[in-house]
Amino acid sequence: MKKYLILILLLLFSCQKDLLDDLEPTLPREDMIFKVEESSVVDGQTIFFNIDSEVKHTLIIFDTERKSVVAKQSFRPTIGLNDFQIFTKSLPKKKLQLTLETSTEVLKSTYIVID
């Protein structure tokens, strides 16, 4: 009787639904944001980038379809590795352009996909 009880328990617990992997390719989440052409960004993600000067810099998130600025943040960086936290709840869920600029030139640019 114990053998049947164990056999029934094994059958019940061994019959679990298989998990299927997503077949759609996903973009990698890259923390060094300007090293890739396109990356996926989630709410609250910290991005990192290198800066060579201490002049005032601006991070701009630009909607290429509507040709409008979605977000803009100016800051005075330190030379070397800098970090910035992106909050995406107020951003549209689509592909946007992220640029790092000074008052005279565009230093770096990449595309971000908001998840």
Image (cartoon, helix red, strand yellow):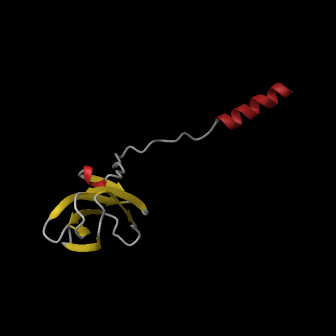
Where the C terminus falls, by quadrant?
Answer: bottom left
Q: Position of residue 69 (x, y in %)?
A: 24, 74
Q: Is residue 42 visible?
A: no
The answer to which of 14 and 49 lies nearer the viewer is 49
Residue visible at 62% across and 39% down? 16
Residue sitting nearer the eye, 83 or 111: 83
- Which image quarter is the N terminus in? top right
Direction right: furthest residue: 1
Direction top: furthest residue: 3
| Residue found 41% across the figure and 69% down from its top | 89
Relative to 33, is 67 above or below?
Answer: below
Total numbered circles: 0
Residue 82 position by quadrant: bottom left
Residue occupying image coordinates x 16% and y 64%? 106
Q: Nearer the viewer, residue 87 or 63?
A: 87
- In this orientation, does residue 67 appear? yes
Q: Position of residue 26 (x, y in %)?
A: 35, 48
x and y percentages locating residue 76 in the rendered image: 29, 69
The image quadrant of residue 113 is bottom left
Image-quadrant location for residue 47: bottom left
Residue 49 x/y as whole percent? 30, 56
Q: Nearer the viewer, residue 15 or 105?
A: 105
